[in-house]
Image: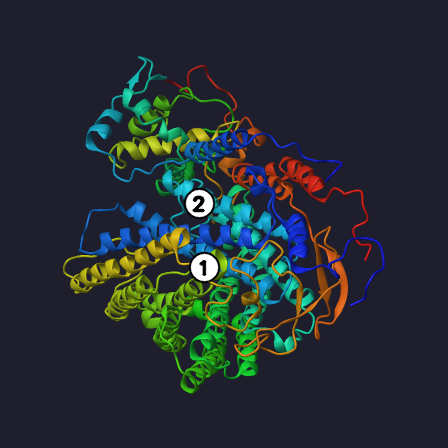
Amino acid sequence: MQEEQSGPPMDTDLDDRELESRLAKTWSTRPGFWGKIACVDHKVVARRYIFTAFVFLMLGGLLSLAMRLQLSQPEARFISPDRYNQIFTMHGTNMMFLFAVPVMEAMAAYLVPLMVGTRNIAFPRLNAFSYWIFLIGGLLLWLAFALDAAPDVGWFAYVPLSGPQYSPGKRTDLWAQMITFTELSALAVAVEVVVTVFKQRAPGMSLDRIPVLVWAMLVMSFLVILAMPAIMFGSSTLILDRLVGTQFYNPAEGGDALLWQHLFWFFGHPEVYIVFLPAVGMVSTILPAFVGRPLYGYMLLVMALITTGILSFGLWVHHMFTVGLPRLGESFFTASSMAIAVPAGIQIFCWLATLWAGKPVYKTPLLFILGFIFTFVMGGMTGVMVASVPFDTQVHDTYFVVAHFHYVLIGGAVFPLIAAIYYWFPKMTGRMMSERLGRWSFWLIFIGFHLTFFPMHILGLWGMPRRVYTYQPELPWASLNLFVSLSSLILASGFLIFFIDAIKSWRSGPPAGANPWNASTLEWATSSPPPPYNFRRIPVVSARDPFSPGNDELTVATGLRTDRREVLVTTIVEALPEARESSATDSVWPFWAAIATSIMLIWSIFSPWAVVWGSIPIAVALIGWFWPKGEAEDES
Amino acid sequence: MAALSFRHGPAWLFKIGALFAALGMAAAIGWVRQPREYRVDPPISAALEQIRLMPNTISGAPPEVYFALNQTYETGGFDLSQGKRFYTWFGCASCHGDGRGGSGPSFMDGWWLYGPSMVSIVSSIRDGRPHGMPAFKNKMTIDEIWQLSGYIKSIGAYKASVSAPSRNDDRNTRPAENRAPAATLFEEGPNPVHPDQGPSP
């Protein structure tokens, strides 16, 4: 890197201690309440994101227990049908929009900058903004539920049921606007991740040296960028139909009810992979640390990730097989749905090969990964079954489908996510989680999960439809339903132990070193938890595994300023240093911008004029956000 | 930022602000929460029958229970929507059209033959009126009649309430009730001569 004789203070000739104190001064968040609100450190924001998402997971889990209570016996009277409709809608909406996608994006926002060796995520203020938007969107939905105004139209809110004629009141508008909130925040994070991965990698981290997790987050972010606009268009047009009386979904006036299903699933199917691909990345990154050998088939895995991402946009119609589409179209989407099993199979075989050739150490993260492989393969097999039209026609909207997607989503995403929490918890908090409680929670979750969801396949084949609030005693479903309800308590107790473990370890877990798992990716090269500037000096990467147990010396680059927040910009393919770029300082304006945006979005449920008048505070907040600092920003 | 630095207030100010924001949001939602009553309790239903009309059968006093129900038949989104369905299902449109009238009077011309109060409308539907308005008391339950009455009032409202129904998934001949059609479509209707108290009260 070039050296400068005079001018601004650089990190070139400083000893470590002096450099750390100067960087800490530049990068630290100011203390106090407003300092916290203004914070744009990607680690702090991501930790809030993850925490909030897990709170929503807990709430969503309580809803599912309520449903299981109601279904535990025929003709039960615990919950009224109207409330039940709200509960299953809330459960699905909450889990997909407020837990699964945000938590995966939050993991990306936390880990990607560390893993690529940079000091902050790209567009850090946008990152803070996205968190506030997500939080307010989640509060909106749950407040609505608390006030008996929660949506009751199912998590995919098909028109005409969700349209103006059949969904009176503001319940569906609240749902649609919550969608807008969460998709806005998801899009913001996705853009940041793409830019961070493409332009802020440590020098030398060429494309073929990027950790698999970072690849997965990159592909996930592209899926978000391509898929979310479809649902934001959908939710906005739905509100327009309901409030202003447009005719997007009214067949009698030239609209099309099926348009909604296409829009929703064009987003909804990639959504599954938005949740699943980060999990693939997590598994691929965690696995090597517990088998003592590098990952088998890096290239294959990355190719499989990209293939899955592309194919995921060609499957959405398999959610609509019973709608009555042309035969040829259905056949095409059957073929593409089955084709996506190929990259998924490649991934599975890469992991099996890694396990086979290594010496597995069965700690909690590895247990959850093995649970993932087992459960996800089962979910994948029922997936291939429902990909075929005749079979799907039989089990559509039955508990078979409920079982299938819980196998794929909990097996394919939640298991790896919990593995990831156990694995990265030391990095995030500086403390280890309990191995003993971890094992308990794994076995309870694993056994509880299968006992809860496997019988649902059978219930579905016996004809029990989804979303019914009760069933008659004459139907042969009662005993299995009672069994499922009891098993769900085992599953819930496993999650309870996990939460207890996380809270306990956070406060008083044994301290973790910088690298407790002897892992080889860059986030372990810094202390736990990392300092606000992430790395004392930007690492220089010369191999796929930047440092391995035998080699814990890292080469580093110097030449960044210490008196302002500066990151290194590198080229896309080879990650050659290109420029020094300033990184945004703390600001409260993202928070106010989020408040202004929320006012506009919530107001627009009641009056279209909100879009006009509500945009004024947004403009004010954005002017504050982007107000020039009075000094040249891009002088390097 | 230096030029437009935001002077931070103390933290408690913010916390109170956040509390008020949350309460405000809750109030906004609570305002339109519209609890749904699918099966009215028999005592309430009996009480809803107890409307006291003036001797000339125009206007009067609604039953006490109507206020205990928060006047839901005029303000609740669900009840108004139900009323809109009954308007179609019980063939109201065959005489009253889309609300602009036909062989029956219009609801949008600002003129209510028996007055615009809920009790008058409920009574018209329940007991019928001279010159062709049939009684529906043997065809609808009393809460359905109240729902339908609330809806009919919303057709003629000059200012739309946020809980008024939106358009149907159908061919629409006028703006939906949440767009205050009476404000834009005000017209005298096919029967321009209005005797003081209806054709023959």
> Considering depth in this image, is A252 or B36 the residue closer to the camera?
B36
> Considering depth in this image, is A482 or A444 the residue closer to the camera?
A444
Judge left or right: residue A365 versus residue A180.
left
Residue denoted by label 2: A141
Residue denoted by label 1: A100
**Amino acid residing under circle 1:** Ala
> Do pointers 1 and 2 mark residues of a single chain?
yes
Q: Chain of mark 1?
A: A
Point out the residue furthest to the top here: B55
> Considering depth in this image, is A401 or A564 the residue closer to the camera?
A564
| Picture quadrant where residue B96 is located | top left
Residue A512 is at least partly visible in this image: yes
Can you give x and y, in whole percent of width and height, for residue A81 in the image? 28, 47
* Vertical position of residue A620 compared to residue B153: above or below: below
Q: Residue at x 63, y 57 (%)?
A: A120
Crowd around label 2: few <14 · some 14–19 · many ≥20 (10 Å): many
**Amino acid residing under circle 2:** Leu
Point out the residue furthest to the left here: A474
Can you give x and y, in whole percent of width and height, for residue A548 in the image? 54, 77
